[in-house]
Every structure is written in structure tokens, then in C-alpha cells.
Amino acid sequence: MSEPLVRFIDVRKSYDGKADAVRALNLEVANGEFLTLLGPSGSGKTTTLTMLAGFEQPTAGRIFVGADDITHVPVEKRGIGMVFQNYALFPNMTVGENIGFPLKVRRMAGAEIASKVTRALAMVRLEGLADRKPQQLSGGQQQRVAVARALVFEPRLVLLDEPLGALDRQLREQMQYELKHLHERLGVTMVYVTHDQVEAMTMSDRVAVFSAGQLRQVAAPRRLYEEPDSLFVARFLGESNILPGTVRERRDGQCGVVLNGGQTVVATAVGTSEKVNLAVRPEKIALGSAAAGCINHFPAKVVEVSFLGDQLRVRLEALGQEDFIVKFANAPGHAALEPGGAIEIGWRAEDCRALGE
Ligand SMILES: Nc1ncnc2c1ncn2[C@@H]1O[C@H](COP(=O)(O)OP(=O)(O)O)[C@@H](O)[C@H]1O
Ligand SMILES: [Mg+2]
């Protein structure tokens, strides 16, 4: 990771002096990085972002931007660009006035404001709409104006809190790519909040997963998906089959786990717990003759086959579970699976993680 731009050091936030909305937060954001805070509703994402923005003060700990301790610096002195849900466009101002507002506040000359507004409009592909009022724009266009307003004063850090939440799926996906490309082109550091895991994976250099005010894991999307280090992350990001069991032996980063039903599974060891939950992704399961070559293989019975177009999703009865899920691509050459049919399933130790708690 290059030089950190943002550092949260032992940051805690309690609104009521009892519960912690954010606790023991240590997190760095690299210069130029696109970092996403991901987690369920109420997990502390917005609280983290508003402390960085300056709308809320930490109860304890410090926040640095570059070499500066900004923990108690007021919002307007932080020079951070923001796209927040509750930080909407000014309805009585035109698009151009909205975008130019941060420059006007900074007492920039009128001609310079005009030229920067024109450039910002082009950047978000809204040329020619400067004189419209926000309500004369579509939802997607309004979000682009908000993004232009956050970028127009060329901040080195931009914060975005669920900026695409109100848009329909197609527009949201389009805007995800636009924002990502803006980030790449401008080299600005972005901290982004979403509860949508696909959005987080699509856009981010790294994703920080929160649950109940706690940062659980921060890693690049692929790493997070392939190597979750807790049951929470394995479940929150994508789908996992979960098999509870007890570790019997450990060797070379792997462990032998006895499932509650008595079967033994060889897995990748994560942590030191005795009681573990094995997590196996549905797309890592081999079927039929391919399963026999895996270190872990078991008999199963087909319960339900769902055709998802590009994928097949199969629900199996296996290892004492009735909802063991297998997914595979709808590619030529797959044997037809019929409900009630017997089939062998298998997976590698590398694709199975033994997670504590
Ligand atoms: N202004 C506030 N006053 C009191 N409690 C708050 C306030 N904002 C958030 N909280 C509480 O703090 C916790 C974290 O909320 P928040 O940071 O908004 O989560 P997220 O953005 O992940 O949904 C929640 O329990 C929420 O109810
Ligand atoms: Mg929020």
C-alpha cells in the first residue's frame, strides 16, 4: 500500500454514552485508493464517514488526513468533497450554481468559477444543462450533479454515502462504472459507503467490512471473497455452505475437522478455535467423477434444480443438511440432474475454510 492519506486511530463513537456505533476502529486509506465501507444497515458505515467529514466528533481516538490531525477541525476547513444522501442539491439554484457553490464559498472569481463549472459538467457528461433546475433532471442526472459539485474544487479526498441507493438497477450499474472511471482518471482518493456487496466488489480497490460497529476485515474484493477470515464475512459476501464441526488435528495450515454428523473434512485452518464452521462456496463444488479426485468427497441427493439462465443452482441433501447449494455455469456437456437422483460431491481443502466463532 502506498502512503496512507487517511488514518483512523483507535476511533470510537457513542451517540448516547452507552452503545458504541463504532468501536476500536483502526483503518488506513491509501492515497489514490477507492475504499468501500460495506456492511448491513446500522453497522457504523455512515458514522465512520461523518466523523471523517467532520459532521460528528469521535468519542475517543484520532483521525489524520495526511500529516494533519483533523479530529477537531471543522467541516468547512477539511477541504473534503462529499456526496451524502442528506446533503442534497439546492433546489432553488440552477445546476451550474449548485456545482459552482463550493467555489463561490471559497471566494473564487466569477470567470474562473464559470470555466471550472463547465469542465465539471463535461466530466459528468451533463454539458449544456447548467441552466436547468435540479427538479428538471432525472435521478441519475441529479446524482451526477452532486458528484460534479463534490469534485469541482479538486479535493484530494471525496466521501460518498450510498450515492446510488435511489437509482434503479440499470442506471446504478452504469453510474458505478462512471464513478470508477472518474476515480481512475482523476487519481482522487474515494471513500465510498454501500450495503450492496456487488457494488462494493465492482468498484473498490479494497473493501472494509463492518458489522455491529466493528471493522471485521479489510482486503481487496477477490481476497475478501476467497479468503474470508470470519463466518460473518463468508456469509455477508456471496453465498457459502456452512458446516459446523470440531478441529481434531492441524498441520501445515490445514486441519482435519469432524462434522457434527461424524464425517471428516480437510480444510484450510483459519485462527485457532476448536469449534469451527466450515465455509465452502457453491461454485467450488465438483460433481460426479470430478468429485472423486477431491480430498473431500461425499454422497449427496439432488433435491431441486433451478435454471438461472447462465447458471444452474442445485439444492442437495448432503452431510446432514437439506440445503447444501452447488452452482455451476450453464456450459455444454453437463449431465442432466434430476431431483431424487444420487450424486457425488467434492471439494479441495484450499476451497474450504475452517472459521472460528
Ligand atoms: N445521529 C445519531 N444519533 C443516535 N444514534 C445514531 C445516530 N446515527 C446513527 N446512530 C446509531 O449508530 C449505529 C450505526 O449507525 P450508522 O452509522 O448510521 O450505520 P450504517 O450507515 O452502517 O447503516 C446505529 O445503531 C444507529 O442507530
Ligand atoms: Mg448509512
Image (cartoon, rainbow, N blue to C red):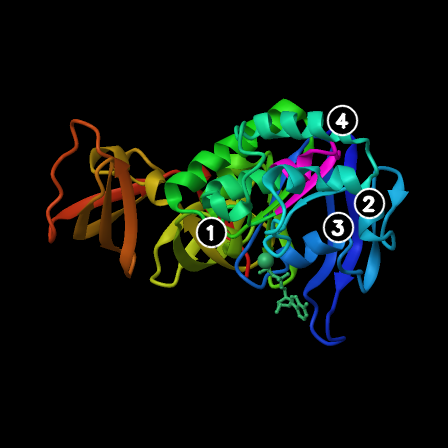
Element assignment for label 2: loop
Check disc 3 and report the residue beneath it. Answer: 52
Contact flag, marks 4 and 3 (Cβ < 8 Å): no
The numbered mark at residue 78 is 2
Which residue is more in the foreground, 169 or 274?
169
Where the N terminus falls, by quadrant? top right
User: Residues in magenta?
Assistant: 148-160
Q: Nearer the viewer, residue 216 or 168?
A: 168
Q: Are marks 4 and 2 in contact (CB under 8 Å)?
A: no
Q: Amino acid at mark 4?
A: Ala
Q: Judge whether residue 219 can be spotted in this image.
A: no
- Earlier residue among tags 3 and 1: 3
**Residue occupying image coordinates x 47% and y 53%:** 236
**Residue 49 vertical position relative to residue 3 in the rendered view, above or below:** below
Q: CA distance from mark 4 to mark 3?
A: 32 Å
Specify few, some or many for label 2: CA neighbours under 10 Å numbering under 14, 14-19, or 20 or more.
some
Q: Which residue is mark 1?
A: 166
Q: Where, by quadrant of the figure, is residue 281 drawn?
A: top left
Spot occupied by residue 326 in the image (x, y as percentages of width and height): 28, 45
Residue drawn where x is 40% and y is 50% of the image: 240
Mark 4 or mark 3: name the one nearer the start of the chain: 3
- Circle 1 packing at 10 Å, graded few (<14), some (14-19), many (20+), is few
Q: In the figure, is residue 184 to the left or right of 310?
A: right
